[in-house]
Amino acid sequence: MVQQEVLFCTELVGLRVFDTRRRMIGRVRDAALVPIINPVRVDRFLIGGGLAWLTVRFDQVHRVSMEGIFLRDEKLTPYHSDEYMLRIVRDLLDQQIIDALGRKVVRVNDVTFEIRQGENYQYLDVLEVDIGVRSIFRRLVQGVLPISLTRYLQRSISPNSIRWEYCNIVEPDPQRRLRLNISHDALEKMHPADLADIVEELSPEDREAIIENIDAEVAAEVLSEMDPDVQARILESLETEKAAAIIEEMAPDEAAHALAELEEQTSSDILEEVTEETRTEVGEIIEYDEHTAGFLMNTEFVALPEAATVQDALNALKDDLEIMETLNTVFLTDNADRLVAAVPLARLLLAGGAEPLKKFASETLIQVNVEERENRVTALFDKYNLLTLPVVDGEERLAGVITADDIISVLRHR
């Protein structure tokens, strides 16, 4: 196995640069990627040798080593700031980034480059971001000890690094995000609870940058894992259209809880941008007092006529597979939509399709009114070990459902 030849950013900065006749023309001050062209390769080196900095393109370098950078082309140009450029020292060192694999926010101490061989030239690829004690040691002795001695001394310190492909840069400026071709695809693949923990660690500007640029469905799942006050602050910071797109993807109860924390005008502006169906569902919940069953309930459930069969229930569930992730009960109602029975889905596994659904209903029907207080609701879940609790209105009509997840959220926020 061929060992990778690497160079650390702490070694690169200050490295001497030589022209084709081996005359020193300056030292490396920074290196930059142009992600829109290549997200890994160092595109150019910034050389300081006097009052002005010069730019060296990657294909102008003959050889890169710990002794210096040796050029094969001396047609250098003055350095000018480029908004499409991600500078390693200026934009990455000492900055917070997201480790998508480890699901955490980390601070960059150093960067590891791999020395690669091109056609008649050598170039650098970003290999890893270093976050551990070893990289701190290199920073402390940078420019004080020779590179060879530093490498020898650091061998006793365990490395701690993140592969570049798992690093996600947080950039609040939307124009700069676009120019740097920053993607949040890796974040969208994370579990919403993990991403929520990460987002909560960030500054308000960085939070907005993440939520604003991930898929609305993913953003809805992430916000659902956060405290309502944090949800509110994020929604207030977003453009109304983006906030509405997120609310559209949230469960009605979760959307109502988030909007209830907002200023009335802000909440109204967002609701004006959602569909009529969402506006109605969310509006029904917001009308209830915050600490009542009506405010806790979710209006998404499966209710069938009391004469329905097992096959009717299976057909209804097939039409809405997503609801099976949150509910484990099918409800039966009479002709006036009054709640008659609750049927646990587990009881249908071995049942025949033609059998009456009511045959498998729970013996005791436990329900609460929409005005029931929160404390009473949590007590019922505890007393009867409930997973689902139906909520009815003043005329005994099924209005919504409270699940164990809702109660866990209530207890967590107390």
Image (spheres, rainbow, N blue to C red):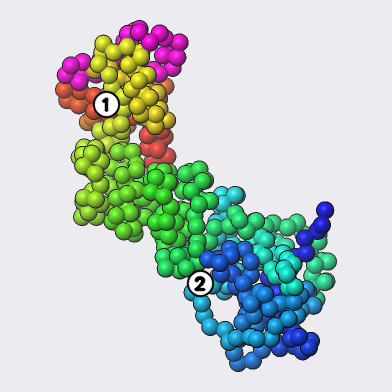
Residue 255, compared with residue 75, is above or below; it is above
Task: Find disc 2 in the rendering and name its residue.
Answer: 84
**Residue 100 placement (x, y as % from top left):** 56, 51
Amino acid marked by disc 1: Val
Q: Considering the numbered disc 1 on the image, is that residue within a helix, a strand or a loop?
A: strand
Name which of mark 1 and mark 2 comes first in the sequence. Answer: 2
Apparent side of residue 284 relative to residue 121 in the rendered image (left or right): left
Residue 229 locus on image (x, y percent) = 35, 50
Region of the chain picked out in magenta, as a range: 334-358
Which mark identifies residue 272? Answer: none
Find residue 202 and report its horizontal and vertical position in percent. Answer: 47, 58
Queried whether the magenta region covers residue 348, the answer comes back as: yes
The quadrant in which residue 76 appears is: bottom right
Residue 13 vertical placement versus 348 (above, below): below
Question: Which residue carries the number 1 mark?
Answer: 391
Q: Are marks 1 and 2 in contact (CB under 8 Å)?
A: no
> Is 89 located above or below residue 258 in the figure?
below
